[in-house]
């Protein structure tokens, strides 16, 4: 054990990322259990199942230990083991494509991550063991493994139980080994060792008797490890936040993932439901949908959730809508000082703001604008609901919920048919529509407009967002009105037809409310809506999609290419090639994520092609409109859509930045050459 621990990690000083060696070694027992189960059914095996699983696992461990000192050997062994595991998965689960798809996806992701890690890090010849860093990485890998096991439990309970037993044993043993090797804190080591032994016995007992409480008890292991880490290294919350904020992409992912996880835990509380307790997967789906301000639901919000559950959803919508700006505000308050340049870049980028000066005042103004619009919207919606016969006091809660949901572009409603029952209420529709537009543009956009009097001209950022927003709203209005005039809009008055067509154009791009039945729309209208959903809102706003400015840059580049211009010029300004590269990367990443999700949904779900495409685009654009397919998803389908919503919220480009190699500055420039692209 001492030898294993001495080779466990390379030395680190921050909390930027868990060591890949830690993850490989922690997953080794799970790999052994999985290979044993998968290999057991192979006809005429060359080796007994236990021996074959042991060979693959030992090769895996050796590859992890040699990953830094000898990258070629390490990556080769890990790749061969992953290929063997994938082959067993394909053969064993050929009759269960859903499970095979999930396991193969995890294998491909793991292999890509391992190969990327070899490109980003230089080989390390000398190993040094640092207790605090080792405990930190052990805790992170335990959390990752716990999440994976939770998914596997939903698919195969027998496999879940075997993997959980192996994982618990290795985590407990490794944590005890780390504490045993601690020679720097003799006074604290006795207490930590006693606590670790007691925790190990408790977790082992719960695992043996296989009670549901044992699964949640595993979370105490990483929490305890983090506590030991803070005690041994004297690292405070300030240091943790600083280390996370130096990597904006990691901060964004951790913020939304942590918020989704906590939200799911609160929704699992019996008091959050009106009847039976919500299942774990449905709670996770609802939490991710709320945090990512999507609005896709598998449960009826006003029927299945109590006031407490609705309050949890509303809190997740509000914090998730403000997004990374909320994280930055909390960090600035805790740090108690001016943010660094990197942290200011993070906040400015999240707010759609290009200048780093006066970031704290910008955050304050954004919060004031947000709460002001939500407050005004609550009052107007209360009046609108009251005019439809709802008592004044009973209309306050749905008005507040709808106002925040509309401003954050979430699409959650406290009415089972969304706003179909208010399609003739002009005050409700136009209030919600205004909140959606303002939230989609971002409060930072409004603040910049207010400052135009003090500036000579509007920045190109404002012009691009404004022009594309107005253009898309008008285009969507005209197309929906013309396509549905004698269909879904039939039976309404002339004014109501105009109002509902306009409302659907507004909500389709960002929010997900609907005032007309989605199942009554023509296929052509659904295609128009999918195009609007893919674009989404503006940078810094609460909407998803590839953003209006991305479309603006791409359209400008296409028009410039048609005119034969070497440089892209718009509104008296010249766009840099870097802007075009970023726009192309964002759009391509969005299409790729959508394509992968669509393949997964089509492979695992029995849906019509149009319904599958619509649900995928709605999840990717964090819109939340549905033609009724969301409620028919099975467990694997819900997991796939959850991934798509999460990727759509944090931005497809962020997913790829997490796996991209660092930028390299070459000491020379290569010769330029053109290729034929026609």
Image (spheres, helix red, strand yellow):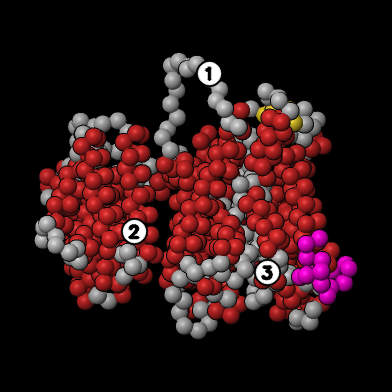
Q: Which residue is mark 1?
A: 672
The residue at which mark 2 appears reads as 103
Magenta segment's dominant SS is loop
Q: Looking at the picture, does residue 432 appear above or below residue 279?
A: above
State which region is magenta. 482-496
Would residue 499 be found to the left or right of residue 6 on screen? Answer: right
- Number of numbered labels in the structure image: 3
* Local secondary structure at mark 2: helix
Q: Residue at x 29, y 54 (%)?
A: 86
Q: Is residue 356 above or below residue 328?
A: above
- CA distance separating discs 3 and 2: 34 Å
Label whose residue precedes the other's in the sequence (1 or 2): 2
Q: Dot 2, crowdedness within 10 Å: few (<14), some or many (≥20)?
A: some
Tell me where residue 313 appears, x and y as whole percent.
56, 67
- Residue, x 19% and y 73% (percent of image)? 208
Image x and y of residue 342, in percent: 51, 36
Q: Relative to 499, does residue 450 appear above or below in the rendering? A: above
Disc 3 designates what residue? 518
Residue found 34% across the figure and 34% down from its top: 119
Dot 3: element? helix
Point 11% across, 58% down: residue:
47
Q: CA distance from mark 1 to mark 2?
A: 43 Å
Does the magenta-highlighted stretch encompass residue 453? no
Quadrant (top left, top right, bottom left, bottom right) of the C terminus? top right
> What is the crowding at mark 3: few (fewer than 14 residues within 10 Å), some, or many (at least 20)?
some
Looking at marks 3 and 1 on the same chain, the residue that comes earlier in the sequence is marked by 3
Is 483 one of the magenta-colored residues? yes
């Amino acid at each position: 054990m001492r030898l294993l621990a001495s080779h466990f990690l390379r030395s680190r000083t921050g909390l930027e990322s868990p060591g890949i060696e830690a993850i490989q070694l922690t997953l080794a027992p799970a790999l052994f259990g999985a290979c044993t189960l998968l290999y057991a059914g192979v006809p005429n095996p060359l080796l007994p199942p236990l021996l074959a699983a042991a060979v693959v696992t030992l090769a895996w461990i050796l590859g992890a230990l040699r990953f830094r000192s000898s990258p070629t050997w390490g990556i080769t062994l890990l790749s061969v083991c992953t290929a063997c595991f994938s082959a067993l998965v394909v053969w064993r689960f050929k009759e269960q494509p859903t499970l095979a798809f999930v396991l193969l996806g995890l294998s491909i992701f793991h292999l890509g991550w391992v190969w990327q890690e070899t490109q980003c890090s230089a080989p390390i010849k000398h190993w040094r063991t640092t207790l605090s860093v080792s405990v930190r990485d052990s805790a992170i890998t335990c959390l990752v493994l716990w999440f994976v096991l939770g998914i596997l439990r939903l698919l195969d309970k027998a496999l879940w139980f075997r993997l959980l037993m192996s994982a618990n044993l290795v985590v407990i043993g490794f944590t005890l080994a780390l504490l045993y090797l601690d020679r720097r804190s003799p006074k604290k080591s006795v207490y930590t060792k006693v606590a670790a032994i007691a925790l190990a016995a408790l977790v082992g007992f719960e695992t043996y008797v296989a009670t549901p409480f044992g699964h949640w008890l595993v979370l105490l292991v990483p929490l305890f490890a983090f506590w030991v880490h803070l005690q041994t290294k004297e690292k405070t919350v300030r240091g943790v936040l600083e280390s996370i904020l130096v990597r904006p992409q990691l901060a964004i992912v951790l913020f939304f993932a942590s918020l989704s996880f906590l939200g799911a835990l609160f929704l699992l509380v019996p008091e959050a439901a009106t009847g039976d307790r919500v299942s774990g997967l449905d709670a996770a789906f609802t939490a991710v949908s709320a945090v990512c301000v999507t609005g896709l639901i598998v449960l009826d919000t006003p029927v299945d959730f109590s006031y407490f559950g609705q309050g949890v959803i509303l809190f997740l919508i509000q914090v998730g809508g403000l997004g990374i700006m909320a994280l930055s505000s909390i960090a600035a308050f805790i740090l108690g000082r001016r943010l660094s340049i990197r942290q200011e870049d993070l906040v400015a980028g999240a707010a759609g703001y290009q200048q780093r000066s006066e970031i704290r005042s910008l955050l304050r103004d954004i919060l004031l604008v947000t709460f002001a619009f939500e407050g005004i919207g609550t009052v107007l919606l209360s009046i609108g609901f009251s005019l439809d016969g709802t008592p004044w006091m009973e209309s306050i809660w749905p008005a507040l919920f709808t106002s925040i949901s509309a401003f954050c572009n979430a699409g959650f409603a406290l009415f089972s048919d969304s706003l179909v029952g208010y399609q003739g209420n002009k005050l409700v529709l136009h209030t919600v529509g205004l909140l959606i537009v303002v939230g989609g543009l971002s409060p930072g956009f409004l603040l910049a407009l207010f400052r135009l009097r003090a500036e000579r001209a509007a920045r190109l950022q404002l012009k691009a967002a404004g022009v594309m927003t107005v253009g898309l709203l008008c285009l969507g209005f005209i197309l929906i009105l013309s396509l549905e005039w004698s269909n879904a809009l039939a039976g309404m008055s002339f004014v109501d037809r105009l109002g509902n067509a306009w409302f659907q154009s507004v909500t389709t791009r960002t929010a997900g409310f609907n005032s007309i039945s989605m199942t009554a729309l023509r296929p052509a209208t659904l295609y128009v809506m999918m195009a609007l959903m893919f674009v989404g809102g503006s940078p810094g706003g609460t909407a998803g999609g590839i953003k209006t400015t991305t479309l603006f840059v791409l359209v400008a580049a296409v028009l410039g290419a048609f005119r034969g211009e070497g440089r892209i010029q718009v509104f008296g300004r010249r766009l840099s090639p870097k802007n075009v590269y970023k726009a192309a990367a964002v759009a391509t990443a969005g299409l790729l994520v959508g394509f992968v999700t669509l393949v997964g949904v089509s492979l695992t779900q029995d849906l019509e092609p149009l319904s599958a495409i619509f649900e995928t685009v709605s999840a990717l654009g964090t819109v939340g409109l549905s033609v009724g397919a969301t409620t028919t998803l099975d467990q694997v389908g819900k997991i796939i859509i959850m991934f798509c919503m999460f990727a759509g919220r944090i931005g497809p480009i962020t997913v790829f930045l997490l796996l991209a190699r660092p930028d390299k500055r070459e000491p020379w420039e290569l010769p330029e050459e053109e290729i034929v692209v026609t």
